[in-house]
Amino acid sequence: MKKCALIAFLALVCSLRLSAQHPVALDQLLSAPFPENLTAAKKMNRIAWTFDQEGKRNVWVAEGPSFNARKLTSYHEDDGQEISDLRFTDDGSTLVYSRGGGKNPAGEFPNPTSNPSGVEQTVWSVAWSGGEPKRLDTGHSP
């Protein structure tokens, strides 16, 4: 994760140096895209990662040999719910992940948008071929 953060920081610094003649707004810096949770399938030439773009967190994938990236999930809102624990199934046909943060010491889940319905940490799956993610259960670490 430190390596991804360093790469993202260096890319941001380079882009700022290239655009030194153009002022950079604070919201541009705060909404810089951020990849993390890179994982690979054990038996196939496939990789997956999470990508936070303007607060909208989604799962992205690519397959060799070309490794053209494509977005696999379609979470369209900045709801503050992180995606973590990203893993491939053994056959590489499905990805499973946790959505939502863990409880704080008071036993509360993070609810950055103050959703009156509340939030919880849940485990999801999504097929490599695409489609709607399926909720599997509450919890984490699929």
Image (cartoon, rainbow, N blue to C red):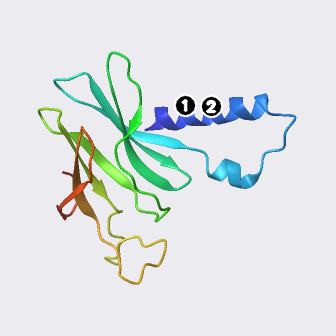
Residue 12, relative to residue 67: is it above or below?
below
Q: Which mark is residue 38?
A: none
User: Is label 1 in a helix, a strand or a loop?
Assistant: helix
Residue farthest toward the bottom in the current orientation of the protein: 116
Helix, strand or loop for disc 2: helix
In this orientation, which residue lies closer to the viewer: 18 or 133?
133
Does residue 111 appear in the picture of this structure? yes
The span from disc 1 to disc 2 (Cα, nearest Å) is 6 Å
Answer few, some or many: residues within 10 Å of disc 2's Cα (few below 14, many 20 plus, some between 14 and 19): few
Find residue 11 and name its label.
2
Label placed on residue 7: 1
Residue beneath the point at 70% across and 55% down: 27
The amino acid marked with disc number 2 is: Ala
Residue 2 in the image: state x and y as whole percent.
Answer: 47, 37
Say which residue appears at 55% left-offset and 33% top-offset.
6
* Residue 137 in the figure: left or right of residue 108: left
